[in-house]
Image (spheres, coloured by chain):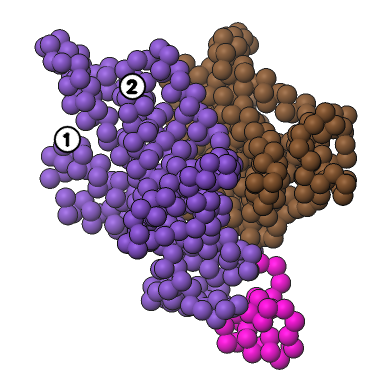
Amino acid sequence: MSATVDIAPPGPARAPGQIAWIVRRFLRNKAAVAGLIVVGLFVLVAIFAPLLAPYDPIKTNWSEIRHAPSAAHWFGTDELGRDIFSRIIYGARASLMAGVVSVVIAFVVGVPIGIVSGYVGGVFDTVVMRVIDAFLAIPFLIMAIALAAFLGPSLTNAMIAIGISTAPIFARLARGQTLVVKVEEYIEAAYSLGVRPMTLLTRYIFVNAFPPLLVQSTLAIATAIIAEAALAFLGLGQQPPNASWGSMLNTARMALSQAPWMSIYPGVAIFLTVLGFNLLGDGLHDALDPKD
Amino acid sequence: MFSFIVRRVLAAIPTLFIISVIVFSLQQLLPGDPALLVTGGEASAETLAQIREQFGFNDPLVVQYWHWITDVFHGDFGTSYRTREAIGPMLASKIPVTLTLATAAMIISLVIGIPAGILAAIWRGRGWDHAVTVIALSGISIPNFWLGIILILVFAVNLGWLPAGGYVSFLEDPVQCLRTIAMPAFVLGAALAGAMMRHTRSAMLTVMRQDYVRTARAKGVAEKTVILKHAFLNAQVPIITLATLQFGTLLAGAVLTEQIFSIPGIGKMVVDAVFNREYQAVQAITLLSGAAFVLMSLLADVLYFIANPKLRTKTL
């Protein structure tokens, strides 16, 4: 007899009708829809940046240094005469990419550790959780700064640093979900039918632990965007001359009294994007888990 | 009570040990020869070999860890390669500055967050509740370094009411100290106040659904007493836990806030250390912040124990 037994879709994984119900719940939540629209707009801005930006974001113009907002430059120009509006449009690419990539890293590293630890249990689980607790004890941004400092300043290293610093949160959440799911009857049924442990972990436990992980991912993107901006602000993220909202704020604070517009718009961009992801995450949470 | 504290301290030891291993391992991420860091650049092969021997870079990692951690226990976090100054005393001089800032920020967040959260729970679904929800979410979404820049722009550059940066010790000049930390403490406290509002609201809503609150109301107890005595006293336990555990967030937030307002605390020290490639100082601060978090969660457990009479009688 073959070792693999394929049984029907795992227990409470959501049926198509249930998904439609979740979508309807989500769409009824005005704040969540607003968050989705804001996030969608910034994603479109990032994708179509070359079409939307009126100027080259890294082209300097010595005759237009620190010009106030005008019809020609909606958000003004910076200390090198570059168009701030165009740099904010291109900066969306760095911020969104950093947010998404670092959360993907955190998810890929943290979730398997958490699921395996929760499933195996015993001493292995105790040891893994102690390590996770130790990682969580180090404040997130300090850990990210320390990692980025040791790895060297670049956008890629900032994403790795943020991803590794976020991974323990995913590991802990995945482990908690695994502990809840693994005692369900359909898991025991699948186990007694001879389903292989790998299939059990991926197709049964992971699928059913996914909704809270999705909510966490959305909220973690918001945190990662702020963290990337913070690292860029400290010179540990996107390097000049490429545009990044955090590094734009760093140069802007040198000219606060002469060119206040340089400080305002990049911050508004970060705030709106992060708010969008937070609203979206809260909305997903409410739609997926109406009990709360 | 004593045995409870002893048990919690013993449980914290493995976590502290693992934190120290993680922090020690950070230096393995450094590309290239660590001896080059000591010399600050180019050096002859003999000099590099001598430095490797002198600083123990040739020793096995376990031996290097042992030397490092025993030094840390003696308060020796290493010496700055650049200034040849000991890192321990430098760190000790920065701690009171960051603690003053963090305490002020914590007070601001409690003063704003708890009453706003209580009122949002009382007036659930009404205008104030929606306003609190929006303000709290905005507080969480605003990057604190940007909020700092905007406050400097308004209150220092345009209005000239507060200094744009710097720090004066409270013992030296209390008034000037409050003037210098007003903006940075608000910046740090704002995000925490947002989290505090959400948490207080949720804790109060849970408690206000309980039978004893309904009974108190049925007995005709004044609404103010029901809320403050019956509901809030029971909701304070999760609030205390959050407030204590958010100390790590305050420390991390201080990194950027101190940088913006030129406050000579631990946060500014870590950024300066990163730029001067003083990796031992980065390690020291990371270790210290991890250890501080473990101590704060220990404190949270003790406060939880004191605040919750049920737990006290059960354990004693």
Amino acid, disc 1: Lys
Residue at the spot of label 2:
B119
Q: Is residue B42 above or below residue A274?
A: below
Give the residues in magenta. B30-58
Q: Is residue B82 visible?
A: yes
Which residue appears at 58% of the width and 45% of the height? B157
* Label 1 Cα crowd, 10 Å radius (few <14 / some 14-19 / many 20+): few
Label 2 marks which chain's residue? B
Q: Which mark is residue B310?
A: 1
Q: Which mark is residue B298?
A: none
In the rendered image of the structure, the colour used to display chain A is brown
- In the picture, the quarter occupied by the C terminus of chain B is top left
Q: Are marks 1 and 2 on the same chain?
A: yes
- The image quadrant of residue B229 is top left
Amino acid, disc 2: Leu
In the rendered image of the structure, the colour used to display chain B is purple
Label 1 marks which chain's residue? B
